Amino acid sequence: MKFAGHHILGISQFDRGHVDRIFEVADRMRPYARRERKTSVLEGAILGSMFFEPSTRTRISFGSAFNLLGGHVRETTGFESTAIAKGESLYDTARVLSGYSDAIVMRHPTEGSVSEFATASRVPVINGGDGANEHPSQALLDLFTIRSELADRGRGIDGLRIAMVGDLRFGRTVHSLSRLLTRFSNVRVSLVSPSELRMPEALVEEMRERGVDVVETDQLEVGIANVDIVYSTRIQEERFASQADADLYRGRFRLNQSIYTALCEPNTVIMHPLPRDSRVGAQELDEDLNDDPNLAIFRQSDNGVLVRMALFALILDVADQVDDYSKPVNWSTERRF
Ligand code: CP
């Protein structure tokens, strides 16, 4: 796949060469994400941002990424603030919005809806999450983070041992990440969930057919021992028939400092796509881990800007011109962390 002009809808589009190229461009975006330099390579370009489900990281980091490349963002959130609330179709919405934009990012609660939208769009569309299906940019930033954390430990992605914990049925981030890991060798994935929230069977089969060693368990202590990464996830309560159904699983696979210290190998990396549920009774990833240096969740969310800048630079075909349009910034770039 060439990137220029293409939609980014799911992980099946990418082979390992694509992943390497995205990461190579993402690495070069660091001075811009750190506000050490600014670039105007996308000056005049407009991103249409449509989020029909709640989002903090994906919406803001895609918008920031586009702004950091010099472009502008026009956004709408929630069905009620668009003409979809008046019965307008995805087809018409895509035809119209793609007349106003150079790229579009969209989140929608229905599986396949972003792909349907993309078929009618005249500009590249990026899937910011479609129901329980996929979240490809999250998987890319997750893998970028895994690569960085393992590099700090003198390792590469091949040979990775990872535990994915929590709601593996409805969690779109683990679906996309599982698919992405099949591009690498000697990967062992430990899937830790209640039996009702297991990873979809077709996805488990896809991983096994592509050579991933998959183990499924409902025992946290079994699943998170002997891994390099623990990837915790939230119970996706918005996908359950009722709150009571979701509440059955709250707090079932809680990782806190004492459990982590007792069960995990030293220096196991702790990841989570966020948001984590910090309400009483949930806390799948306890805040008593906040000062543990192995907690990578905020390095992970920071990496979202790098990877999303890379995706825009590639689909708009400016990846190798970003530095040609760059200058130092005028303001203080001191950060407290
Ligand atoms: N990880 C993620 O998708 O977060 P948001 O829902 O805040 O975008």
Image (cartoon, rainbow, N blue to C red):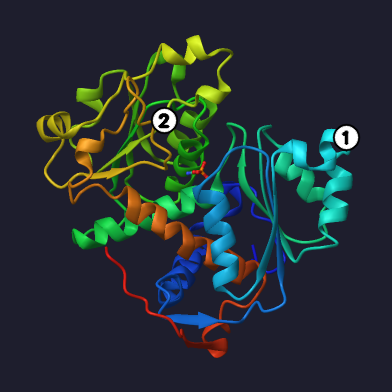
On whether ligand 1 comes within 8 Å of the CB at mark 2, the answer is no
On whether ligand 1 comes within 8 Å of the CB at mark 1, the answer is no
Percent coordinates x, y for residue 57 in the rendering: 49, 49
Percent coordinates x, y for residue 309 in the rendering: 54, 67
- First in sequence, mark 1 or 2: give its number: 1
- Residue name at image x 49 percent, y 32 percent: 171
- Residue name at image x 30 percent, y 40 percent: 162
Q: Quadrant of residue 331?
A: bottom left
* Front label number (1 vs 2): 1
Q: Give the spatial CA distance, label 1 vs label 2.
A: 33 Å
* Viewer-nearest residue: 211 or 17: 17
Tag 1–tag 2 contact (CB < 8 Å): no
Mark 2: few/some/many CA within 10 Å (<14, 14-19, 20+): many
In the image, is residue 109 above or below residue 103? above
Dot 1 amino acid type: Lys
Q: Which residue is mark 2?
A: 234
In the image, is residue 199 above or below residue 90? above
Percent coordinates x, y for residue 212 in the rendering: 38, 39
- Residue name at image x 37 percent, y 76 percent: 333
Quadrant of the frame with the C terminus? bottom left
Dot 2 amino acid type: Arg
Q: Which residue is mark 1?
A: 86
Left or right: residue 276 versus residue 269 is right
In the image, is residue 178 above or below residue 202? below
Name the disc covering residue 165, or none: none
